[in-house]
Amino acid sequence: MITPTLSPEVAEALADGRAVVALESTIITHGMPWPQNLETARSVEDTVRAAGAVPATIAVLDGVLYAGLTDAQLRALAQAQGVAKLSRADLGACMAQGRTGATTVAATMIGAHLAGIGVFATGGIGGVHKGAETSFDISADLHELARTPVTVVAAGAKAILDLPKTLEVLETLGVPVFAYGQDDFPAFWSRASGLAAPLRADDPAQIAAAHLLRADLGLGGGQLVGNPIPADDEIPGEVLAPVIAQAQAEAETQGIAGKSVTPFLLQRIFELTEGRSLTANIALVRNNARLAAAIARELGQPFA
Ligand code: PSU
Ligand code: MN
């Protein structure tokens, strides 16, 4: 198996058995505009450090899989044009061709696991898109959660997705889905989705213990922790619903499909909310980084 190339900071932390949190890179290249993408990436890394863990941003640069980027690499990635969006299907080809690619939730889980990192913080996961009954657009993130043993902390799934169907598929795949500190599964920009999460956790230690027990049980696969956006940063569902509907209608008219759907919708929602969606997005990623660091500290040594 390949071990990703580690940044000096991550190599040292793993060798010492200290807590490490993986971070994705598609959010940098396809999820946010420049320069907020770089500012957010740096601030999320600093949030992980302030919470007592070491950040390991995962990406493929010129064909090399990294866990942990230097600041110069992070800056170059944030400004690069034509970066590939890598899921499970794309990783091998991107590396074979010596190309640069940003990792989605699915590919970040793979990179984290290869590096021996058990926890990963992101904004929102991919899921079942609205209209999936005809488009069959179901993110590979859901299948990855079913097979790769990494606990993913996200603010739920966005209302651009079909949340009831997303929860159904996760249940079918045997993925534990927790809401953190509440009963409702969070809805990314809003704290509540109106849907009960299958499981609830109120303590990072419980989440870490469940992660370890799943490994002991030989179950394979990861866990999804839905961490609600801080109350001060949330955007009410009523405000977003028409914006999402408009972005979705435009995607349909313009024939946007496949990998381009999620980045297109995020960009349009950013424009239509005049940046408010981005401010909320940054706040929730940092909030997830804090919780992921707390879980990583509880996991401790076994992943070193
Ligand atoms: N959700 C966000 N921001 C993002 C993404 C999801 O709030 O940038 C990215 C993640 O990398 C996720 C990917 O893994 O989109 C899902 O893409 P798709 O729907 O094409 O599987
Ligand atoms: Mn898709």
Image (cartoon, helix red, strand yellow):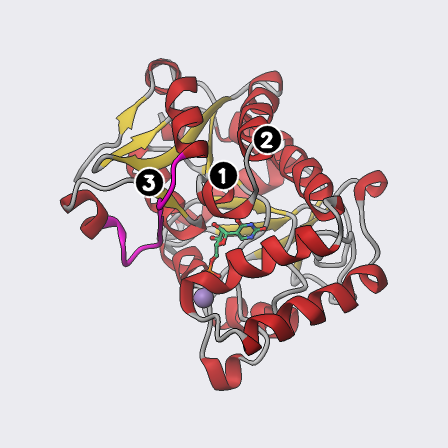
Q: Is residue 123 left or right of residue 302?
A: right
Return the residue at label 3: 111
Res 131 seen here = yes
* Helix, strand or loop status at disc 1: helix
Question: Which three-letter amino acid code belongs to the residue tagged 2?
Answer: Thr
* Helix, strand or loop status at disc 2: helix
Q: Which residues are magenta?
A: 80-91
Q: Position of residue 272 (x, y in %)?
A: 72, 56
| Circles 1 and 3 in contact, beta carbons < 8 Å | no
Q: Position of residue 94 (x, y in %)?
A: 22, 47
Return the residue at label 1: 28
Residue 231 marker:
none
| Circles 3 and 2 in contact, beta carbons < 8 Å | no
Res 200 seen here = no
Question: Which three-letter amino acid code belongs to the residue tagged 3?
Answer: Gly
Classify the position of ligand 2 by quadrant: top left, top right, bottom left or bottom right: bottom left
Which one is in front, 179 or 209?
179
